[in-house]
Amino acid sequence: MFTLPAAAINVFITYFFLTLPLRLIIYYAKSYKVVITSRRIADWILLFLTVGATVSTATAFLFQPLEPGESVFFKYILPASGAFIMTVPYFHILSWLVGRKPFYTKKHLQYLDYFTVYLRSFNDDRKNSRLKRKMTKAMSDWFPVYAIGNPDEFMPPPGAKRIYVDDDWQEIVLEMIQRSKLILHRVSTSENYLWEFEQCFKRYFMQKSVFWVDNIDEYRQFKRIIKHRYGLEFPQLEDRKCHVVFYYELDWSFRIIYLAEKEDYQRFRWLFEQSHKTLFESNKTYLYARKNKMAQMIRISKDPNIPEGVQKWSWTAFWLPEFYIICQQVKYRVIAYFIIIGTIANLTMSSPSIESAYRIVLFRAVIMVLLGYNGRKLVWLSHHWESFRYFERQEHLGNIVVQLLGILYIIFWIAAAIIMQFFDFTKINS
């Protein structure tokens, strides 16, 4: 039988060979337009392979022989429905396996209100990837981290989100450093990074800058360059075998933190918050929702710390709660599986009667009302939204996907019901 694990292997191999020409095109072309087009094609390939694999798996259950005494529900409806509903999480699992990451173009800038811009040399992307992710993760706990993408990479690497642009990258960087809440510098001596540093210095953005050092020798060279060009005296760092982060205090002195242990990243975050209370106080509404997700998810009443537009009724979440939670990637998606398991438990543990039907309908109605009321808020609290505008856009697109899946699900079972009328499953050979 065609199972999802076997389908995953087939999809992985097929995807790799189908996208191999795209990888070669991206590597040799080094053009932003080619990169964007090739990645979009790769995404569509993965999507079609995922849908094909899940539909094939769901259909395979319908062609199993029905043995005497077996339930049609357990033999056909339950496994086929489960395979179909798993389409979205299956797509995300495959995306992780093939290394797919979201990517953005400069049009995405219109949605950025809360974000950190990450300035670095492209050559640094290939060094210390694990420690790089630790630092960008520490920063993204406040605001999402964005960086300009390298044009010769097939997919964005882990860490900061990548925005891919044309030759106007300098204009994009200027706009990003002006609008960003924070600026993360990975200190380098490359000409492009030195130009980016100069723009921050000339526009008086040093107070919202965090400087990250992973190479002491390169830092010393960088220190000499800025001393010569701008008369800036950066701190002398100890030659330790670890990363270092430093930033300006309000009195223009430097706070230096050596990142040798996991706890050092937490100490950095705490110290930075204490030094920049004005920044975090002015964004307390955004940060409040981020830090109290679980408490907000179980709260029924409206919260003044969450945008009013988020706390609206959602008809999509009301009619299709499982699809909504999975497709919108609500945090703690176990809620969706709890709904499914609860519905199945009510079906299987109850004898066929009016009372059991009422119990199933009541359980389903309670879930639908709760999701209809809290659905949009759950989505808002489950992600690091860069702005309310971006939330509205993604909520709208997600609802379209949910509704399409709901329609396809209905069509699937109508077609299956018609097909099953023409087959005697008790006579099909195993």
Image (cartoon, rainbow, N blue to C red):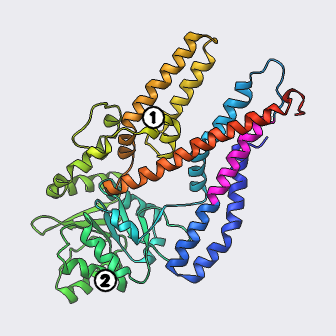
Q: What is the span of residues highlighted in magenta in the rendered image?
A: 46-63
- Give the labeled residue for mark 1: 318
Q: Quadrant for residue 87, please give it.
A: top right
* Nearest to the observer: residue 287 or residue 62: 62
- Give the labeled residue for mark 2: 194
| The C terminus lies in quadrant | top right
* Nearest to the observer: residue 353 or residue 277: 353
Q: What residue is rendered at 36% in x and 83% in y?
A: 192
Q: Is residue 161 magenta?
A: no
Which mark is nearer the camera, 1 or 2?
1
> How many marks can you see?
2
* Nearest to the observer: residue 418 or residue 156: 418
Measured as percent of width and height from the top left, residue 7 is found at 71, 49
Question: Could one spot residue 241 in this view of the protein?
Answer: no
- Left or right: residue 25 versus residue 108 is right
- Badge 2 marks a residue whose secondary structure is helix
State the predominant SS element of the stretch in magenta. helix
Measured as percent of width and height from the top left, residue 44 is found at 61, 61
Q: What residue is rendered at 38% in x and 42% in y?
A: 376
